[in-house]
Amino acid sequence: MSKTVIVTDSTSDIPVDLVEQYNITIVPLRVLFGGDAYLDGKDITASQFYKRLVESSQLPTTSQPSPADFVAAYEDIFNKYPDCRILSMHLSSEMSGTYQSARLATDLIQENLQGQVTVWDSKSASYGFGMFVVHAAKLSSEGRTLEEIVASTEELRSKRQLYFLVDTLEYLQKGGRIGKASAVLGTLLNIKPILSIDREGVIYPVDKVRGRKKATSRIIEVFQRDLPGVTHIKVAVGTTADPASVHDFLEQLSAVFTIEETTYSDIGAVVGTHVGPGTIAAYIWPA
């Protein structure tokens, strides 16, 4: 049976210990502050990024890996495991060209290896798909086939619910997602937008609530609506520069659900460029 090797990109925001435990290959995106370019997660950590972000008057930009970056990653894997199959899992194609770069790379590797690479569009972002990558890597470590891994991961995707709360509208405005007037008014009114990602991988607004605690309470209400009858859950929580907020959120969540497993993820530089510090993202699925 062919070994399945899991590849992803740095926007998956997978905790380092899980990357190492399951030998996941990560191809980094780039973050650019003016003339300074950094490989996400390699040249700049999440904490270093947010420190520079709040100090900078100019919003950084991001860029996807090139097809050549993926070719290098795939060829390195095939050199180590000549008979393996690769499952390359990436940020929503609606948000980035990363998935397309990975697809193009499969046309550039040796012809006899092209059919050995499967590129999978997560239709999600951050640990919202990082959890799929970890799930796939666990199954691979158990010796499951590529087809079994993809089928199981797609089933998990159908059950997982996610919402994220942006603390400030400033970065959405700087990135051109909303107008300046809306950002200023929202800030004055202490509006906390609740967002999600639809089944096609597109971000959409869910609600707007005044005050952070009311907003997290609203997220939990929506989780209850989405998972009727579910009492036991697994949860993953992603944060930018405010990890303390996770404790309060999990306390609220545990009053409604029995939490069987919790995973903590740092939202990295690329996603953080667009959502800013103070963001909290919650991903839950039935235990």
Image: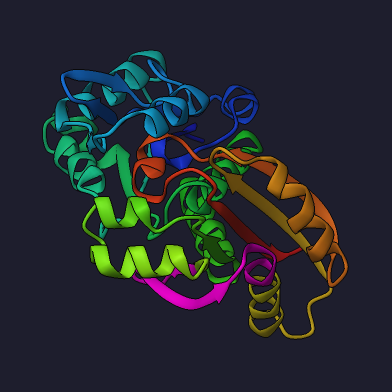
Q: Is residue 124 magenta?
A: no
34 and 133: which is toward the camera: 34
> How far from the left and from the top, in percent, is residue 86?
38, 36
Classify the position of the C terminus by image quarter: bottom right
- Residue most extreme to the front: 188
Tell me which colouring the rendered structure shows.
rainbow
Compared to 229, does 164 lie above or below? above
The region drawn magenta spans 193-216
Can the viewer see residue 88?
no
Q: Residue at x 17, y 35 (%)?
A: 105
> How far from the left and from the top, in percent, is residue 251?
84, 58
> How far from the left and from the top, in percent, is residue 173?
28, 57
27 and 270: which is toward the camera: 270
**Residue 101: quadrant of the picture:** top left
Q: Residue at x 32, y 21 (%)?
A: 39
Q: How many marks?
A: 0
Compared to 19, does 194 lie above or below? below
Left or right side of 73 for 51: right
15 and 241: which is toward the camera: 241
Compared to 137, does 69 lie above or below? above
Q: Is residue 208 magenta?
A: yes
Can the viewer see residue 227?
yes
Q: Residue at x 21, y 37 (%)?
A: 114
Left or right side of 114 for 131: right
**Residue 42: quadrant of the picture:** top left
> How far from the left and from the top, in percent, is residue 153?
53, 57
